[in-house]
Image (cartoon, rainbow, N blue to C red):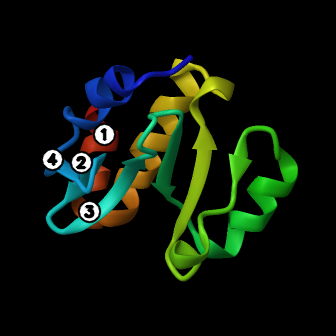
């Protein structure tokens, strides 16, 4: 199972990324924009994801992905159950979520060096 420490090891290495503890939850953000947020029990991870593809990803793998809570439906957001992904998939989700919130030039420069 992927853990908070696994996600932290990827997220803290991304340019402009920082960790925050907000209302009992660990979150990662770029500036004020949150791109990852753990559930309080750290079993689920909310991540930046395009709204227009959210239903498709949830429908394709409902044991892995879920819709965000009602208050987060207006955002580009989806949720993954950490027990259902491996380290490789976690890394892809984290980097893709981060790339949604940084300037394109920063994401491109990172992709060229990674």
The residue labelled by disc 1 is: 112
Q: Residue at x 82, y 44 (%)?
A: 61
Q: Is residue 40 above or below residue 47?
A: above
Give residue 109's mark. Answer: 2
Q: What distance separates the C-alpha of mark 4 from that of mark 2?
A: 18 Å
- The percent position of residue 54, horizontal first and vertical second, equals 69, 65
The residue labelled by disc 4 is: 18
Give residue 57's mark. Answer: none
SS category of the residue bearing label 2: helix
Q: What distance separates the C-alpha of mark 3 from that of mark 4?
A: 12 Å
SS category of the residue bearing label 4: strand
The residue labelled by disc 3 is: 102
Q: Is residue 73 above or below residue 54?
A: below
Mark 1 closeness class: few <14, some 14–19, many ≥20 residues within 10 Å: few
Contact between labelled residues 1 and 2, with CB atoms less than 8 Å apart = yes
Mark 3 closeness class: few <14, some 14–19, many ≥20 residues within 10 Å: some
Q: What distance separates the C-alpha of mark 2 from that of mark 1?
A: 5 Å
Contact between labelled residues 2 and 3, with CB atoms less than 8 Å apart = no
Mark 4 closeness class: few <14, some 14–19, many ≥20 residues within 10 Å: some
Considering only order in the chain, which callout, 4 or 3, is on the residue closer to the N terminus? 4
Considering only order in the chain, which callout, 2 or 4, is on the residue closer to the N terminus? 4
Q: Residue at x 80, y 39 (%)?
A: 63
Question: Which numbered disc, 4 or 2, marks the residue closer to the eye?
Answer: 4
* 44 lies left or right of 21: right
Name, please, the residue furthest toward the bottom: 74
């Amino acid at each position: 199972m992927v853990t908070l420490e696994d996600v932290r090891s990827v997220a803290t290495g991304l340019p402009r990324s920082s960790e925050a503890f907000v209302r009992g939850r660990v979150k990662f953000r770029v500036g004020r924009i949150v791109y990852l947020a753990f559930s309080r029990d750290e079993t689920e991870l909310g991540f930046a994801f395009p709204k227009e593809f959210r239903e498709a990803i949830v429908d394709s793998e409902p044991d892995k992905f879920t819709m965000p809570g009602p208050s987060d439906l207006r955002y580009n957001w989806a949720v993954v159950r950490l027990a259902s992904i491996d380290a490789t998939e976690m890394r892809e989700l984290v980097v893709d979520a981060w790339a949604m919130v940084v300037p394109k030039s920063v994401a491109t420069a990172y992709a060229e060096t990674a």
